[in-house]
Image (tube, rainbow, N blue to C red):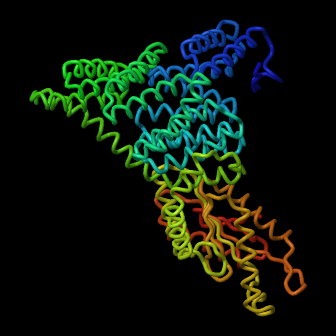
Amino acid sequence: MNFFYNPTRPGLVQESEIIQRIESLNAAAYDMISLAPAEGLDLSKRAYQLATSDEFRHNPYPKGVADALFNMSHFHLEQGDTMLALAQAKEALNIYIELRHNLSQASTLRLLGMIYVHLNEYNKAMISLLKALEMAHHLHDPRLLGEITMTIGQTYLVSGEIEPAITELKKAIPLFHSRDLSIQLSYAYNFLAAAYKMLGDYEVFDQYLMRSIELAEDMRVLPVRIDNLRQKGQNELRKGNLDAASVLFEQALQLAAHQHYHTDEISCVIWLSEVDHYRGNLTSAVQHLINASAQAQTIHYEEGCLRADRKLAQIYAEQSDYRKAYEHFQGFYQIEQRIKREKNDLKYMTLETIIRADALQKEARIIQNKNDQIEKEIAERKWVEEALRQSEDKYRRALNLDVTTSVNTLRYFYDLAEQEIQRVMRYPHPLSLLIIDIDHFSQVNERFGYVIGDQVLQWVARRLKDLLRVVDVIGRYGGDAFIMLLPETSLENAKIVANRISQHFADADFEVAGEKLALTFHAGLVEYKKDLPVDAFIQRADQVLERASRSNTQHIMVWEDKSDQPAFD
């Protein structure tokens, strides 16, 4: 049995047989996700009814309610009831936030991301997934990290961004391998198969699809088995094997209908209409599409409406029924334009996703020691392209790095700061700026020479890189000054960072010509305010840096909007 901590009660939640029954039902339901959705949904509903029964009128058991809502949301999403799934996931998240249950919060944020993908709201999906990634980053759970990374890849895939989709999906695979998570691997391989099919690389598509089929059949992962059949059918249709394609689509449809996977049913019916269209059976094709469109409208499945309307417009135009063709084209166009705006906006978030995913990989310290033969073959086939890309990236980075310290030049730092401010304007979050200036550094140059002085600066730069996060940005501000941009960092947290850096240098031993050198610095710190230009943002930090340099007691000073600028230690 899985036990959960509940902040409203002391110790493990085992106070009654009812609570244990709720936990047992929720645990059993969770295990049925992707395997037996109808049974799992029934168990979740029973757990919810127990957790909200009269037994808990005066002493609520919120964790049981939240777990039941989380599971029901999963099952309703699989069955295509997306709006109900969204409401349940949001309610579960609110409870988990109150309970301060970080693991459940991260899992629910990932679930919300999946729901928003089904709604074609890619920006909301990515925002939820990035929040989940940030939380999972500190939980060190390979399974959760892999699932979130895979869902980010799925988001890119559905939005048509194939290269970043492949990158994220490949990052997830070693995480799943490290825990022998076959179900998750079946999903990842299936998504990669779809990605390479969209690129037209059918050799790699076949390899990934076969891996997915083996795992999905072995683990009885129904959603993946359905999509495996559908992808095989699409490939047969591409090759002109209409009978084989029709059989595969029918098999996928029967599986989907049996488990009430309504979105999969709609997709299979639309693909059967494609077979009818190829055969010239337009009456059957139209009937399939009308049925699919009606069902898609009922469950608010925009992708189904989009595809059905597009195909109906094409067929009616071929039949010279231009009035009906125009009606369905209008329906298609309205949905297509909204989705296109979502896809365009998603591109602006790609850099942020890459930065956070890289930070995730670095701090998780997960080594890819189980690469399979497919990855090797792909790498061997594309090594020239990758080498050229890396060479180009290396040259581009070199132009933006300070020659002495290998941190960003001030010019490039301004560019990065401007990009971060634009991101803050779109997606509000705290942002702080820190400038430090080494005390009495001119004496080092005068006493030991400029070569030693450069070595000291290089040592300081390396230490700062070690102390900061991967997402933080560091640049050389002047001769002996460094400037740091701290995303997602409030002023209070930035003070902690500044003090940690100060203490680190105070405790560090640095020897020059056999003599220990004590390094101290003064610093200016400012938090970003709305509509503040980048020049003014940096100028504020520079002004309090100047005040700190003149102070005998306060070596770190903070910008405040008041005339008085207090310092802190």
Tell me: 452 left or right of 388.
right
- Residue at 58% across / 57% down in the picture? 431
Pick whichever, 88 or 293, lies toward us: 293
Residue at the (68%, 22%) spot, across then down = 63
Judge whether residue 559 can be spotted in this image: no
Could you tell me residue 20's position as x and y percent? 75, 13
State which quadrant residue 247 falls in.
top left
Q: Is residue 39 left or right of residue 315?
A: right
Evaluate whether residue 104 shows in this view.
Answer: yes
Residue 207 in the image: state x and y as whole percent.
52, 40
- Report the number of discs: 0
Residue plotted at (56% across, 54% down): 379
Above-or-below relation of 83 to 467: above
- Given residues 478 and 331, the one toward you in this image is 331
The residue closer to the viewer here, 280 or 224, is 280
User: Looking at the image, is 345 positioned above or below residue 271?
Assistant: below
Q: Quadrant of the C terminus?
A: bottom right
Q: Which percent across, then down, holds residue 341?
A: 34, 45
Q: Is residue 528 above or below residue 414?
A: above
Between residues 530 and 148, which one lies in front from this camera angle?
148
Of the 4 image quadrants, the one containing the N terminus is: top right
Q: Is residue 51 above or below residue 422?
A: above
Occupied quadrant, residue 11: top right
Residue drawn where x is 9% and y is 29% of the image: 320
Q: Position of residue 336 (x, y in %)?
A: 30, 38
